[in-house]
Amino acid sequence: MEVTNELIEQITKLVVKELSNKRIVDKEDSKDIHSSIFEHIQKSNRGMNRKEVVIGVGPAFGSVIKNTINNLEHEKVIKEIMAGVEEEGMVPRVIKVYKTSDVAFIGKEAANMSGSGVSVGIQSKGTALIHQKDLYPLTNLELFPQAPLLTLDIYRQIGKNAARYAKGVQVKPIESKNDFTVRAKYQVKAALMHTRETEYVDNMKKSIDIRLSGVC
């Protein structure tokens, strides 16, 4: 049998549907059974510091899910993005966005909270983008859609470029790999991770300022 993109897509839909039928998630109870790499600080508000770059993460990031699709630890990913921002002399702030699992809207929400108006948005599976508050949600400054090919060094460069946008200076092109087999290899896992994250979307819950546990 020939394995085509259409066949993979059909299998993915069947797997996701089957899991969705079996899994009943009580969101409130789930908060208590998943430890998090983050501590909650306060409800997020629009920052006033023009040097601030906000990093928005998805609702399951660092708690229900703790590794990206290619098994990078979320804690290390966040540290690299923050380090990239700081190396450019800017100030990172991390928020958890609950009302969406779409990376475009995560980034847009973070940009609206950012003192500089620039943000990095990232899903639990690792897909990331750089956003700006004046742009429409589905437009952005830079998009990194092939999460399986992203490395810690690339995440650091994403942080640096976000900071450069915030400073209004020229950004440096981020060299990314391209592998046409990635979609077939990771399509099922990507769908499952996105479904899992979407289960924790809460349209009524405001974004929260967070920090890595044990970091003051």
Image (tube, rainbow, N blue to C red):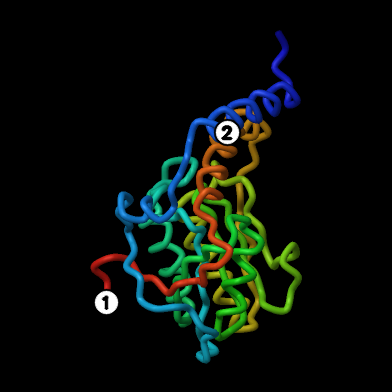
The relative height of residue 111 versus residue 152 in the rendered view (above or below) is below
Task: Determine which of the numbered discs, if any, sits on residue 186 in the image.
Answer: 2
The spot of residue 45 in percent (x, y) is: 51, 83
The relative height of residue 127 versus residue 179 in the rendered view (above or below) is below
Characterize the local packing of mark 2: few (<14), some (14-19) or many (20 or more) Cα atoms within 10 angstroms: some
- Among the two numbered marks 1 and 2 on one chain, the one whose residue lies closer to the N terminus: 2
Mark 1 residue element: loop
Residue that appears at 45% across and 81% down: 91
Q: Quick one: 216 or 162, which is closer to the camera?
A: 216
Check contact, mark 1 vs mark 2: CB within 8 A.
Answer: no
Q: Which residue is label 1 attached to?
A: 216
Q: Would residue 21 appear left or right of 94 to someone viewing this image?
A: right
The spot of residue 3 in percent (x, y) is: 70, 17
The spot of residue 88 in percent (x, y) is: 49, 78
- The Cα atoms of the two marked residues, 1 and 2, are separated by 36 Å
Mark 2 residue element: helix
Task: Determine which of the numbered discs, if any, sits on residue 172 in the image.
Answer: none
The quarter in which the C terminus is drawn is bottom left
The quarter in which the N terminus is drawn is top right
The spot of residue 32 in percent (x, y) is: 31, 54
Q: Amino acid at mark 1?
A: Cys
Q: Quick one: 145 or 62, which is closer to the camera?
A: 62
